[in-house]
Image (tube, grey):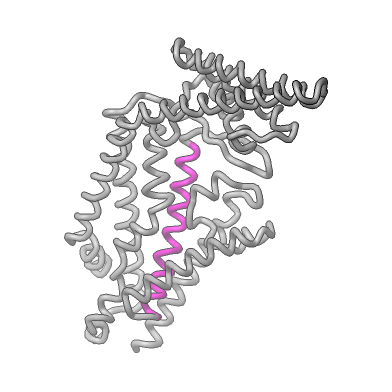
Amino acid sequence: MKLFLFELKKFAWTKKFLIILIALVCSVVFLFIRNVLFQDYAQEQKNEEIALFIETSSSKDSGYTSQLERLGNNEEVEMKQELNLTVLNLARELRNVMATEDDWKTELTVENRLLVAISEYKATGEDYPISDEDISHRIAMNHTLLDLEIPPEFEHYSTAFPNFLKQVVDLFISYSGLIIVLLLIGEIMTREFENRSINLLFTLPLNRTKLILGKYFSALLTSVFTFFFIIAVGALIGKLFGAEGSFAYPVLIEKEGHLYYMSTMDYLQFVVLLFAIMLLFVIALYIYYSLVFKHLLASLLAIIATLIGGYQLGNFINWTPFAWVNPFQYTIPKEAILYQNEHLFYQGISVTLLATLLLVVISILRIKRNFN
């Protein structure tokens, strides 16, 4: 226990740790302020999209009219013009609803009718400035929001408490979480090697196993505290200054080629769970690399290359059973939740935990063999 507390103090009672916490608080505050300031921008982007649809359909209608004047009666051109006019009329209707009514249900209903009309128009082989994937995702989201009777939020600029907390988790845990971990624990073993104090350390009556475990669990506890701190700051800011929102707000996921939704609460729980599992693995892997390379920069480069390579390999190999043996699939936990077409999100949990245990054991054996 004394060794564990000693190692924990080396992480937590440092200026670097305090600076990281302050930087994270400032980043979360900045994110919320940015969302508040960009509300009008997000609405403007939506208005510009509708204006683009109207401009596109108007231009196409003129083109079809010219073709019919030149070619005479043509069923195919007439059909395309009719479908395009439906899109044009619905786009104008949606613009009017957005400008004159404060009724999100009517807006989503008209938007879905517009998206269906665009999909039918594109089915004729014509192009349109919106992808089929975007159409299907937006229709599914709008239907779900209407069914749940939850008003829509701007995905990237929401100030609603649950949606903002999700954004904090996505940004500071799912995407940049491992970078924060490496900043926290970068010198976990390499400092002793670079300062040449490792041999002096082993002249003391220290149990090699307890030394590795002390470093591992102190690094783990420091990292866990940091990320719970991030979540707490995000929750506090969202609760105090954000709109109420709902944790039932849907998050769309792709599963075996179909779109489903889960609540924001379930999504947050699964992302944090997968990140915690990946955290166990990454810390164990970094300790092992620190023992192998004995240098900070080399260890960091090795683990970054390993994580990127392992994750890309998982994306490259579409063989479904590979998910059961790939411990790197949770490098970006958000992606494992949102895209479950080739494998389900839980399939890699067991192999990741097993790989973690093996790395800890190998590190203990290595330090016993090399420094006895």
Q: Nearer the viewer, residue 198 or 169?
A: 169
Quarter containing the N terminus: bottom left
Q: Is residue 92 left or right of residue 258?
A: left
Q: Position of residue 63 (x, y in %)?
A: 67, 26
Q: Residue at x 27, y 28 (%)?
A: 241
Q: Which residues are magenta?
A: 266-292
Q: Position of residue 17 (x, y in %)?
A: 22, 58
Task: Establish if 15 lies above or below 110.
Answer: below
Instruction: Specify whether residue 290 is painted magenta.
Output: yes
- Secondary structure of the magenta portion, mostly? helix
Q: Position of residue 52 (x, y in %)?
A: 53, 28
Q: Position of residue 18 (x, y in %)?
A: 19, 55
Indicate the quadrant where residue 139 lies: top right
Q: Is residue 145 left or right of residue 34?
A: right
Instruction: Specify whether residue 180 is painted magenta.
Output: no
Q: Residue at x 53, y 49 (%)?
A: 335
Q: Residue at x 70, y 34 (%)?
A: 126
Q: Is residue 200 left or right of residue 150?
A: left
Evaluate whether residue 218 shows in this view: no
Name, please, the residue furthest toward the top: 100
Quarter containing the C terminus: bottom left
Task: Establish if 88 lies above or below 218.
Answer: above
Q: Residue at x 36, y 48 (%)?
A: 172
Indicate the quadrant where residue 35 lies: top left
Evaluate whether residue 280 shows in this view: yes
Task: Establish if 354 lies above or below 125.
Answer: below
Q: How many marks?
A: 0
